[in-house]
Image (spheres, rainbow, N blue to C red):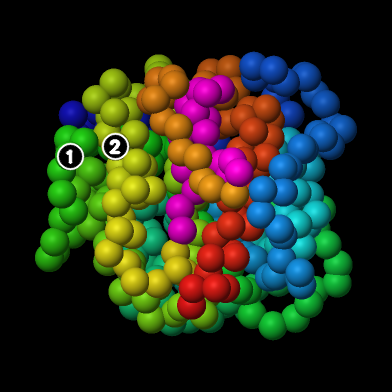
Amino acid sequence: MKRFSAILAAALLLTGCGSSSPDTTANGPGDEPGSTTPPTIHVDPGVDAPDQPVKLVFIHHSTGEAWLADESGGLGLALADSNYFVSDTNYGWGPEDPQRGGAIGDFTDIGDWWSWFLGPSSDEIMRVVYAESGQNSSYSRRAPDPGGANQIVMFKSCFPNSHIEGAPGDPPTTGHNPLEGAGLDGLTVANAKGVYVDLLEYFGAHTDTLFVVISAPPLLASDTSPEAAANARAFNVWLVEDWLADYPHANVAVFDFYNVLTADGNHHRVVDGQIEYVTDQGSNTSAYAIDGDSHPTATGGQKATEEFVPVLNLFYERWREGD
């Protein structure tokens, strides 16, 4: 199993998560081939958007790039319409992480979040994250820059992180965790949970920032195993329902991007002012994947945008009222 996982990760890195972004207008299910016209995104306000511009930085790679893009997922436009001033990181961004041997922007796997927030270079990394006001992807955003530090830090891993070993109910690793600072090496349910539990130390010391975890998108069924896909489902449900159960602050939240992309009927959205989380209407693999590639289609990205923006508004409102 470990050998299969290593081979899978290497293969997936070659499909785009470890290189430049694929064609964000590729014709997957429901997509027009080669379209460059920005989609019409219907975002139900659900909860009122912020009254004043809010600075947000999104840490991502190629699936995030496609999600932001005007002609694909349309997230950048939708966030601008909701009064968020969006900046982002991408490949090659930021200070060098000596442990990983390159710019920290190159490393966004689950194990890498320990390096961003808790590792030896984390103080310098996060100083630059809070100060970032540039664009490292192509998307429309509101103007002008309202100034000041980023109030919201969103971060997302890519789809190789949805091939997880172990068992669905494994508890978080305590003590030494081989996944911390190691990217995908040692990606199990227990180790992934352990990384996120440890991150709460940093988040709890920085309640003046809202941290939003975007779960990694699902894999094609052909790119994973039923067991690993079931682990991904269990891990992401744990993030949404259990990870923050005993966390005393309102400055950390989770959007299950994975779940939204697993079926038309699966949702993480606002209904009547409350979050609706439906996870049992499809499989544990991608229902919105580019043909032969686990990158989400534009249609999948647009669905996620329509569900996410009202959820973000609710997260923001709760944070402003709760901390």
Q: Is residue 248 left or right of residue 322?
A: left
Query: What residue did someone put label 2 on?
Result: 234
Q: Amino acid at mark 2?
A: Ala
Is 139 located above or below residue 5 in the figure?
Answer: below
In the current view of this chain or complex, which residue is farthest to the front? 272
Q: Earlier in the sequence, mark 1 or mark 2?
A: 1
Residue 93, located in which quarter of the rendered image?
bottom right
Q: Amino acid at mark 1?
A: Gly
Residue 10 percent across, percent down from the top left = 38, 36
Residue 306 percent location from the top left of the image: 67, 40
Asked if the magenta segment contains residue 267, the reply would be: yes
Question: Could you tell me which residue is drawn at 29 percent across and 37 percent down?
Answer: 234
- Pick whichever, 18 or 28, lies toward us: 28
Q: Is residue 144 above or below residue 300?
A: below
Between residue 218 and residue 2, name the one nearer to us.
Answer: 218
Residue 306 in view here: yes
Distance from the alpha carbon under mark 1 to that under mark 2: 7 Å
Q: Secondary structure at mark 1?
A: loop
